[in-house]
Image (cartoon, grey):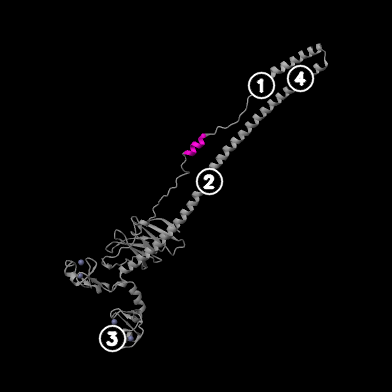
């Protein structure tokens, strides 16, 4: 049997050398109780007011490791008093020393008796709920931000790709222009060379003809005929030779090359990147996280600052049906009279005297304070919020939703 098991055994029974499983724990006696000992414990005058909880409850409570009492290390005794000047738990000796000049200390048990229903605890609870809710919203918001930047990344990659495609398209375009230009110029040069070669071949054939004619003259003609024929052939030859010479003067060798537009390389060399990736930060409004939280009441208790008995003036036959009330910054009070025949706001002064009525066309339900007040009309067919300027009692345009 280990220590934990022993703790679950009823202490009074153990004292009587009996072994019984405990189901309860008395916080005041600091001991476990079985069902029958708990019954006895409850019927004893001395222990009937003890704070008894379940064994399980005690285990959970112990896991919180919150001391039952605070201990004053300076004066070596339990702190069982409360100094309201310092909002501090103190010991008896503290009241005569460090807290000697404070408001008289009160018993801690008096201050803590309504702790569970105190404004302090309920405010703490609602603040925790609020913080948890807000944190959940913020975490969701952060997750959304993650999704957003993921989308933005994809969009940027698309933009870069498109930008690159534009550059590629432009390069394709200039490549096409220069290819076409090369084709035209090559074909023109080709044609020029072909024409020249054709002209030269024609002359070659003609010179060949003249040579053949000379051969014929030499083979078959008489000397005189050869002389006459050769003179005529020489004339033709000379004429052709002059033509050829002037033609040859015009023939030029053709070379095709390219001078690249260096501007593109100069521009490319200057390019360090396609753009700048900028990470911009925008205010999330989280800075208001703590600011909006409700303030804990001083002294852990709300105090009534003023009690006022107010009689709602009844100037008509129908009694008012007051459903809601607010206090304006100027301390005037507005009561919402939702009686079907009255339908009005009754404005009372700080001392409770009647100031004026603001008549309405529909039955109002609630008001929210400011210089202007907003009214809800839940019984209207059109869902709307009415706005009334309290300085001149005039209605402003309704907000429909
Ligand atoms: Zn017992
Ligand atoms: Zn007890
Ligand atoms: Zn002390
Ligand atoms: Zn004090």
Residue occupied by mark 1: 248
Residue 29 is left or right of residue 149, and the answer is left
Residue 93 is left or right of residue 223, and the answer is left
* Helix, strand or loop at mark 1: helix
* Helix, strand or loop at mark 3: loop
Q: Residue 144, located in which quarter of the rendered image? A: bottom left
Real-space CA distance between mark 4 and mark 2, rounded to the nearest whole angstrom: 72 Å
Real-space CA distance between mark 3 and mark 2, rounded to the nearest whole angstrom: 88 Å
Q: Earlier in the sequence, mark 2 or mark 1?
A: 2
Q: Earlier in the sequence, mark 3 or mark 2?
A: 3
Dot 4 beta carbon under 8 Å from ligand 4: no
Can residue 389 be seen here? The reply is no
Q: Earlier in the sequence, mark 1 or mark 4?
A: 4
Q: Position of residue 290 (x, y in %)?
A: 34, 60
Q: Residue 57, located in which quarter of the rendered image? A: bottom left
- Badge number at residue 44: 3
Q: Which residues are magenta?
A: 262-269
Residue occupied by mark 4: 211
The residue mark sitting in front, 3 or 4, is 4
Q: Position of residue 298 (x, y in %)?
A: 26, 65
Q: Position of residue 327 (x, y in %)?
A: 31, 62
| In magenta stretch: residue 268 | yes
The residue mark sitting in front, 4 or 2, is 4
| Residue 263 against residue 328 in the figure, above or below | above
Residue beneath the point at 59% across and 38% down: 176
Q: Earlier in the sequence, mark 4 or mark 2?
A: 2
> In the rendered view of the protein, which quadrant contains the C terminus?
bottom left
């Amino acid at each position: 049997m280990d220590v934990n098991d022993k703790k679950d055994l009823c202490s009074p029974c153990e004292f009587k050398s009996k072994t019984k499983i405990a189901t309860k724990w008395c916080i005041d006696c600091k001991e476990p109780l079985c069902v029958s000992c708990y019954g006895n414990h409850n019927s004893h005058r001395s222990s009937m007011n003890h704070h008894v909880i379940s064994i399980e409850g005690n285990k959970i409570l112990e896991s919180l490791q919150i001391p039952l009492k605070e201990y004053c290390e300076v004066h070596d005794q339990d702190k069982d008093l409360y100094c309201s000047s310092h909002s501090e738990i103190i010991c008896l000796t503290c009241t005569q020393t460090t807290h000697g000049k404070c408001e008289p200390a009160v018993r801690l048990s008096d201050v803590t008796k309504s702790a569970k229903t105190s404004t302090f605890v309920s405010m703490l609870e609602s603040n925790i709920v609020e913080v948890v809710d807000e944190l959940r919203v913020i975490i969701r918001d952060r997750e959304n931000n993650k999704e957003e930047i993921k989308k933005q990344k994809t969009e940027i990659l698309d933009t870069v790709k498109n930008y690159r495609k534009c550059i590629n398209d432009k390069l394709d375009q200039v490549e096409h222009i220069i290819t076409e230009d090369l084709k035209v110029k090559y074909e023109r040069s080709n044609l020029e060379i072909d024409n020249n070669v054709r002209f030269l071949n024609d002359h070659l054939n003609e010179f060949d003809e003249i040579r053949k004619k000379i051969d014929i003259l030499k083979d078959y003609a008489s000397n005189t005929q050869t002389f006459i024929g050769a003179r005529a052939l020489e004339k033709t030859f000379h004429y052709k030779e002059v033509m050829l010479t002037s033609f040859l003067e015009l023939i030029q060798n053709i070379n095709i090359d390219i001078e690249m537009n260096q501007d593109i390389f100069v521009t490319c060399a200057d390019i360090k990147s396609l753009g700048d990736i900028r990470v911009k930060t925008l205010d999330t409004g989280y800075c208001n996280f703590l600011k909006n939280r409700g303030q804990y009441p001083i002294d852990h208790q709300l105090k009534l600052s003023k009690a006022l008995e107010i009689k709602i003036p009844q100037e008509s036959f129908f009694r008012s049906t007051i459903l809601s009330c607010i206090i304006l910054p100027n301390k005037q009070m507005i009561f919402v009279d939702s009686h079907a025949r009255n339908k009005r706001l009754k404005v009372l002064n700080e001392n409770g005297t009647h100031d004026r009525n603001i008549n309405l066309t529909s039955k109002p339900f609630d008001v929210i304070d400011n210089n202007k007040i907003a009214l809800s009309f839940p019984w209207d067919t059109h869902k709307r919020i009415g706005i009334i300027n309290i300085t001149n009692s005039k209605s402003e345009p309704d907000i429909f939703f």
